[in-house]
Image (cartoon, helix red, strand yellow):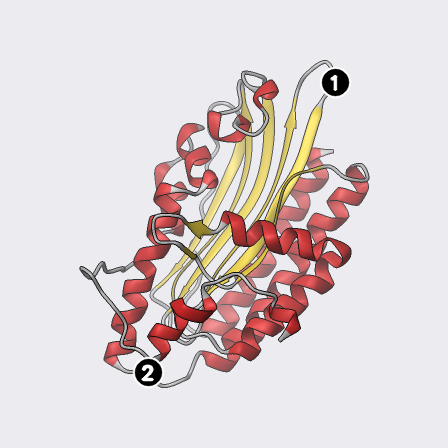
């Protein structure tokens, strides 16, 4: 069961790295293989200081453990303390150009060894623009809906709810799809859904990247990009269950925190001027809404 998932995640990692190297046009991904004493393997790959990508991390992990960490059982306490295997692919792209959105994608599979084995899939992808273009947001959600079909409304709502910063009272970005603890229809159907999500990520993101990567921008817009990256860091460090799981499970810290932006900025009491694109971001785009009804 898990061997098929591991094979798919590793193939997807390679495909995504090749495509991101192509759209960047100058930099390549590092390659590492880490084999922890408990078994399994981790293959973190990072691209840094490219022509169009400031930082991207695409990571594959196959973990074997004696007991699930708390972050993985807070929604399923009956699984606490049981041996497990997990496979995951996770990626983040922090572009150079403020008009290219940051993006994140994750797919994961857990199987817990018990009298009756328990397994589930999770994952999704979301988009975090600094200067959103409505057509890009709509296209992103159209591709997501095609990928998950009848589940889109449920997964879209779950994404809006998960990627939310309660202390800022705003969503992290313009959303996408998110699902967790998924075993509906049995393994084959659930795995097919996970593959559909993974296979649709590049068609959802690359057209946006290609259209915006050479757009002109000012120093002030670069500063705003760094300010918004601070929000991204806040979510990853204070809220994200994936970060907590990685730290609690004893994974290599450099790999767990590779999703953080290379540069970010916090500006005390910043308020965007009314009527500017910076104000429109929080007033309009960072509020859950039905983008496909636009």
Residue in front for this viewpoint, 152 or 258: 152
Image location (x, y in percent) of residue 160: 53, 54
The answer to whether 261 appears left or right of 200 in the picture is: left
Please say if 130 is above or below 243: below
Q: Secondary structure at mark 1?
A: loop
Near mark 1 (Cα within 10 A), the count class, few <14, some 14-19 or many ≥20, is few
Q: Residue at x 51, y 81 (%)?
A: 211
| Contact, mark 1 vs mark 2 (Cβ under 8 Å) | no
Which quarter of the figure is the N terminus placed in? top right
Please say if 181 is above or below 149: above
Res. 16 mark:
none
Image location (x, y in percent) of residue 67: 53, 19
Which residue occupies the extreme left position in the image?
268
Residue in front for this viewpoint, 205 or 70: 70
- Residue 203 can be seen in this image: no
Near mark 2 (Cα within 10 A), the count class, few <14, some 14-19 or many ≥20, is few
- Residue 282 can be seen in this image: yes
| Residue that badge 2 annotates | 217
The answer to whether 227 appears left or right of 93 in the picture is: left
Q: Secondary structure at mark 2?
A: loop
| Residue that badge 1 annotates | 116
Q: Residue at x 62, y 66 (%)?
A: 141
Which residue occupies the extreme top position in the image?
115
Q: Report the Cα–Cα distance between label 1 and label 2.
A: 56 Å
Please say if 138 is above or below 186: below
Please say if 9 is above or below 101: above
Among the two numbered marks 1 and 2 on one chain, the one whose residue lies closer to the N terminus = 1
Image location (x, y in percent) of residue 101: 45, 69
Image location (x, y in percent) of residue 3: 70, 36
């Amino acid at each position: 069961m898990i061997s098929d998932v591991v094979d798919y995640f590793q193939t997807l990692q390679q495909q995504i790295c090749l495509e991101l190297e192509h759209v960047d046009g100058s930099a390549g991904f590092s390659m590492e293989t880490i084999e922890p004493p408990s078994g399994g393997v981790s293959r973190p790959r990072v691209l840094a200081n490219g022509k169009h990508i400031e930082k991207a991390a695409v990571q594959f992990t196959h973990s074997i453990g004696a007991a699930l960490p708390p972050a993985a059982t807070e929604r399923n306490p009956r699984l606490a303390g049981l041996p497990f295997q997990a496979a995951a692919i996770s990626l983040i792209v922090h572009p150079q150009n403020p008009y290219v959105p940051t993006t994140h994608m994750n797919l994961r599979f857990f199987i817990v060894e018990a009298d009756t084995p328990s397994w589930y899939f999770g994952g999704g992808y979301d988009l975090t623009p600094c200067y959103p273009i409505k057509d890009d947001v709509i296209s992103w959600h159209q591709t997501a809906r095609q990928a998950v079909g009848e589940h889109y409304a449920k997964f879209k709502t779950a994404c809006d709810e998960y990627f939310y910063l309660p202390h800022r009272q705003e969503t992290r970005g313009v959303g996408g799809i998110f699902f967790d603890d998924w075993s509906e229809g049995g393994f084959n159907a659930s795995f097919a859904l996970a593959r559909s999500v993974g296979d649709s990520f590049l068609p959802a993101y690359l057209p946006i990247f290609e259209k915006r990567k050479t757009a002109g921008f000012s120093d002030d817009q670069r500063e705003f990009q760094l300010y918004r990256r601070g929000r991204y860091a806040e979510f990853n460090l204070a809220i994200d269950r994936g970060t907590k799981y990685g730290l609690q499970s004893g994974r290599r810290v450099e790999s767990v925190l590779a999703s953080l932006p290379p540069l970010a900025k916090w500006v005390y009491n910043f308020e965007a001027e009314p009527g500017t694109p910076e104000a429109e971001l929080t007033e309009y785009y960072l509020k859950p809404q039905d983008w496909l009804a636009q």
